[in-house]
Amino acid sequence: MELQYQITKEQLIVPMPKEVDHHIAKTISREIDFLIDSWHVRKLIFDFAETDFMDSSGIGVLIGRKKTMDMHRGEICARNLGERAQKIFDKSGLAQIILVESGREEKQ
């Protein structure tokens, strides 16, 4: 599976896949870390518009990237959370450490 990242200036948008499990988590982490370092990313946005499933390895991807962005003095946020993703964010505590964007095009 190839993810289509969007990079503009110092912002990276990561469209999360339909299923985020241990099979894809390492790839996502490695690719995002490379892009953060290569492009000097200051804002990392995870877009969950297409995501139906995320296990604990997906939570690990987010927490790991949060730590990376903290070291780079950047920010991290999530958008387009469906009902399931929102529950995962709430129950895991992700909603307390990662900003969830809301707006016209995003779900909360």
Image (cartoon, helix red, strand yellow):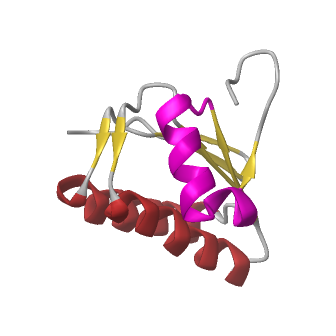
Q: Does the segment drawn in magenta span residue 82?
A: yes
* Residue 106 at x, y percent in the picture: 70, 24
> Please, which residue is most extreme toward the bottom here?
71
User: Looking at this view, is 27 or 56 the one in front?
Assistant: 56
Total labels drawn: 0
Q: Which residues are magenta?
A: 80-98
Q: Position of residue 20 (x, y in %)?
A: 31, 47
Measuring 72% from the left and 17% from the top, which residue is drawn there? 105
| Residue lying at 67% horizontally and 61% vertically, measured from the top left | 41
Q: Is residue 84 left or right of residue 56?
A: right
Q: Who's the residue at 70% across and 31% down the image?
A: 108
Q: Main secondary structure of the magenta part?
A: helix
> What residue is drawn where x is 20% and y is 39%?
1
| 64, above or below 108, in the image | below
Q: Please state the horizontal and vertical placement of residue 89, each as a whole percent of the image.
A: 58, 52
Is 97 located above or below residue 54 in the figure?
Answer: below
Q: Is residue 53 left or right of residue 91?
A: left
Residue 17 located left or right of residue 49? left
79 and 3: which one is in front?
79
Residue 105 higher or lower than 26, as above or below: above
Estimate the x, y position of residue 18 in percent, counting from the top left.
32, 32
Residue 23 visible here: yes
Residue 83 magenta-highlighted: yes
Residue 34 in view (yes/no): no
Q: Quadrant of residue 34?
A: bottom left
In terms of depth relative to the viewer, which is nearer, 84 or 46?
84
